[in-house]
Image: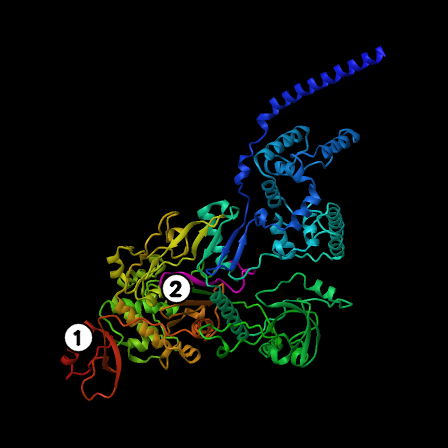
């Protein structure tokens, strides 16, 4: 008995010593490690990486940029089934422990002992995982584990359980660049959190442990096994009942990649916005959850895409089929899997699908499309390609003379557009309707390129922008990065300069051969020509512009003066060094982009004001607070005096060289302050006389509505009365242009080859660019009233003699009506009186 008491005493003393030693060791450990335990205060306002989102003016998604897919979500918005699935998979006692599950920790320690010190996975609570993922490295050391435990205790003291769980479900990597449960639900199932089934909740929860090896897409067998285990845990912890369990266990896993649903196809503009964001916000622009709202109109962008692609394909058809993209041996047997494999290196290009020709007959071909369909291509849908038969000489007749089995081709599914008459009142008809598909047609990716810019003339807001046929094929943005010759579309600027020197739409210039010294060729002569090599003799400027007569423009420029006109043209926003200092300027040999031309034509459309194109309207931070708001220069037209009286406007100086190649830069528009009332509107500078502007707009209406105007097709096709514009074709048909507008919308279209190859003989701007412009402007303006500028004070209308351009004397029957500035008409009337008895009654330059 005495021995037993002694042993008991010794054991008690030993235990006490162990406790003391443990306390001392713990104290020493705390003294050593406490400085390394991080403060968790930052978790109360943690900022997770969230991708940049770019939206249209009406809030539709254009693009999303960032390495991580993440959608932070508040814990109260997480459905119970998903919370319970995560708890069942990772930490079922989360709401009942103090941050450490001592049983699991002891079990993990025993595993380490049994494995002779080898570190094993397990034993970590959700709180420990939060500590590890936010503050610690993934390195497995005893020291890090102790710090993790201490940090977990600190997190539990500072944060509520819901706050900890919210951090966890938003932070964790769940495979395929997805972080957090909301991003996983969207990517794997294309759903919001409240749309997930019990089985899908369990599948997402299954990815927390080993997301690269077990996620809803990769290794589905592993995923289903893990998912079913999670469902079993949910049942055992009474998170679900038996019926829910049985239903979820039986459910298949139908996960598939779901990228963010891009609602507006505008990749060229999205890239412009991304670059601006990086320039102004730094690298955090792609990770800090910014939302950039652009000026883009989603409906107009869809119309622009369709118009450019469809009409560029029409141009491509005129120049014939170039043959298949490749030729392969047909697989044997020709199963869908084998046919898909043959097409695996090809992708959809703006609706042009790759297809493999499987059989050919005289009247039709059969082809397997990458969409999984087997289609027939009748001869009627490929007549445009018959010219290829003569060049290729592959034998056969009809379709067999164009295609062979094994050809990899492009096809398009053709749908009938909704007739404008059936569109809702006041709403433009949609170009691509939702009617059932009609048939498939043989196509090819156009070799030529095109670009389109659509601006609001009131403030320069970019409403639509297309930088090429397909962004994935070529990221070069021809809308802003190219510098091409505008041809005759540059003439309105020269005519406008002439109007400031007393010329009028009725002034007479001789269309006759001219030979001038050529500085580039010592002793040589420069002999410009008209496009049709004809000479019309003396003609009024209105007719010369409508018919795009080159020699009249050259003589007019020579008369007004190259230096004066060159300086004058910079008023439209062109940099001086882009404009040639010689008479070739009259033929449009400047170097300009479609954006620069759209900006310049906006001056005509808005009454004479130079606006600056911009496309970023607002930047919001992750909390929805605006950190930037554009305050663009506005063409106020008739309201300068009123706003100045109210003290709400700031006059802006002319900026002829600003933003010519960098529209939308944040520095090109004033920013509203981050707090307080927004700044008042800035008035764009008036750069030309509103009367000159009105006369030029009227003359460009003659381009469209004149019986021999180069843009007359627009009048016949669109049936409107408010359109003005000008065609342009550079030397040897390298570039085709049409720049046109009404007072609500300015649209510029360019067509050409990137390597400056000719578009082909007689491929004028009226044949290449104008059809694209019409295909866009028709539906864009459908149902909208005519929008023209009001006649400004100081403009009068008079009857003139068609031949002399002077006010018609009484009894003259060769007359027409013309508009003038008041002082110009007074001068011409005096001139007419003096020359009434003289002949000729006009000057021929």
- The part of the image, by quadrant, that contains residue 338 is bottom right
Residue 740 vs residue 229, the one in the foreground: 229
Q: Is residue 342 magenta?
A: no
Q: Is residue 215 left or right of residue 762?
A: right
Mark 2 is surrounded, within 10 Å at the Cα level, by few (under 14), some (14 to 19) or many (20 or more) other residues, namely: many
Q: In the displayed structure, would residue 186 be above or below residue 75?
A: below
- The part of the image, by quadrant, that contains residue 842 is bottom left
Q: Is residue 803 left or right of residue 355?
A: left
Residue 365 vs residue 587, the one in the foreground: 365
Region rendered in magenta: 455-475
The structure's colour scheme is rainbow
Q: Residue at x 69, y 20 (%)?
A: 22
Does residue 186 appear anywhere in the picture?
A: no
* Count of numbered labels shown in the rendering: 2
Q: Which residue is mark 2?
A: 456
Residue 117 vs residue 531, the one in the foreground: 117
Q: Is residue 284 left or right of residue 360?
A: left
Q: Which residue is mark 1?
A: 826
Q: Is residue 466 magenta?
A: yes
SS for dot 2: loop
SS for dot 1: helix
């Amino acid at each position: 008995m005495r021995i037993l008491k002694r042993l008991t005493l010794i054991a008690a003393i030993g235990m006490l010593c162990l406790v003391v030693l443990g306390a001392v060791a713990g104290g020493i450990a705390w003294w050593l490690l406490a400085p390394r335990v991080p403060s968790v205060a930052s978790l109360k306002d943690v900022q997770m990486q969230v991708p940049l989102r770019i939206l249209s003016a009406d809030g539709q998604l254009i693009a999303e940029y960032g390495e991580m897919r993440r959608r932070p979500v508040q814990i109260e918005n997480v459905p119970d089934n998903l919370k319970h699935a995560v708890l069942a998979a990772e930490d079922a006692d989360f709401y009942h422990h103090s941050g450490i599950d001592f049983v699991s920790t002891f079990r993990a320690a025993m595993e380490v002992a049994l494995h002779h010190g080898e570190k094993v996975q397990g034993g970590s609570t959700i709180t420990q995982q939060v500590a590890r993922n936010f503050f610690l490295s993934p390195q497995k050391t005893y020291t890090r584990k102790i710090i993790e435990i201490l940090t977990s205790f600190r997190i539990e003291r500072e944060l509520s359980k819901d706050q900890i769980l919210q951090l966890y479900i938003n932070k964790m990597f769940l495979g395929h660049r997805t972080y957090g449960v909301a991003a996983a639900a969207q990517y794997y199932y294309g759903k919001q959190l409240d749309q997930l089934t019990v089985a899908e909740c369990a599948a997402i929860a299954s990815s927390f442990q080993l997301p690269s090896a077990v996620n809803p897409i990769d290794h589905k067998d592993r995923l289903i096994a893990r998912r079913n285990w999670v469902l079993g845990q949910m049942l055992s912890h009474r998170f679900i009942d038996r019926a829910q369990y049985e239903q979820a266990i039986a459910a298949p896993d139908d996960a598939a990649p779901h990228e963010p649903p891009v609602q507006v196809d505008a990749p060229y503009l999205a890239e412009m916005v991304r670059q601006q964001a990086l320039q102004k916000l730094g690298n955090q622009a792609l990770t800090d959850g910014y939302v950039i709202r652009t000026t883009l109109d989603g409906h107009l962008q869809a119309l622009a895409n369709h118009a450019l692609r469809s009409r560029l394909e029409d141009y491509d058809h005129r120049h014939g089929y170039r043959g298949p993209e490749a030729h392969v041996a047909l697989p044997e047997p020709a199963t869908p899997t084998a046919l898909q494999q043959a097409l695996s290196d090809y992708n959809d290009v703006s609706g042009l699908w790759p297809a493999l020709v499987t059989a050919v007959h005289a009247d039709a071909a059969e082809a397997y499309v990458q969409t999984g369909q087997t289609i027939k291509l009748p001869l009627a849908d490929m007549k445009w390609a018959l010219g290829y038969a003569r060049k290729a000489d592959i034998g056969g007749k009809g379709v067999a003379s164009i295609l062979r089995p094994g050809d990899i081709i492009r096809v398009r599914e053709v749908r009938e557009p909704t007739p404008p008459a059936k569109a809702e009142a006041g709403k433009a008809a949609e170009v691509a309707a939702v009617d059932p598909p009609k048939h498939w047609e043989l196509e090819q990716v156009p070799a030529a390129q095109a670009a389109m810019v659509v601006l609001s003339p009131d403030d320069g807001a970019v409403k639509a922008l297309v930088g090429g046929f397909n962004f994935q094929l070529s990221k070069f943005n021809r809308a802003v990065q190219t510098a091409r010759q505008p041809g005759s579309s540059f003439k309105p600027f020269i005519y406008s300069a002439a109007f400031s020197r007393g010329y009028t739409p009725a002034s007479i210039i001789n269309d006759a051969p001219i030979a001038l010294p050529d500085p580039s060729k010592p002793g040589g002569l420069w002999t410009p020509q008209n496009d049709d090599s004809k000479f019309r003799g003396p003609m009024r400027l209105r007719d010369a512009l409508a018919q795009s007569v080159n020699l009249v423009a050259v003589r007019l420029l020579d008369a007004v003066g190259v230096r004066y006109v060159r300086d004058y043209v910079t008023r439209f926003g062109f940099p001086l060094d882009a404009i040639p200092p010689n008479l070739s300027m009259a033929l449009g040999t400047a170097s300009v982009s479609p954006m620069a031309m759209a900006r310049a034509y906006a001056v005509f459309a808005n009454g004479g004001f130079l606006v600056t194109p911009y496309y970023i309207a607002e930047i919001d931070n992750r909390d929805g607070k605006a950190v930037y708001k554009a305050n663009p220069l506005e063409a106020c037209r008739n309201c300068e005096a009123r706003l100045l009286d109210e003290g709400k406007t700031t006059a802006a100086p002319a900026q002829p060289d600003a933003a010519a190649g960098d529209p939308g830069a944040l520095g090109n528009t004033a920013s509203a302050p981050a707090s307080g009332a927004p700044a008042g509107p800035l008035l764009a500078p008036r750069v030309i006389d509103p009367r000159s502007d009105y006369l030029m707009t009227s003359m460009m209406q003659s381009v469209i509505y004149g019986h021999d105007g180069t843009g007359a097709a627009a009048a016949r096709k669109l049936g409107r009365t408010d359109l003005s514009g000008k065609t342009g074709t550079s030397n040897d048909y390298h570039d085709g242009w049409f720049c046109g507008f009404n007072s609500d919308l300015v649209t510029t279209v360019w067509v050409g080859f990137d390597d400056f190859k000719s578009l082909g003989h007689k491929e004028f701007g009226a044949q290449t660019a104008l059809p694209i412009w019409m295909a866009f402007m028709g539906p864009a303006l459908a149902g909208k009233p005519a929008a023209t500028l009001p006649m400004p004070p100081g403009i009068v209308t008079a009857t003139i003699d068609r031949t002399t351009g002077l006010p018609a004397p009484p009894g003259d029957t060769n007359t027409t009506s013309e508009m003038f500035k008041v002082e110009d008409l007074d001068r011409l009337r005096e001139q007419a009186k003096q020359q009434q008895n003289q002949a000729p009654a006009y000057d021929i330059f």
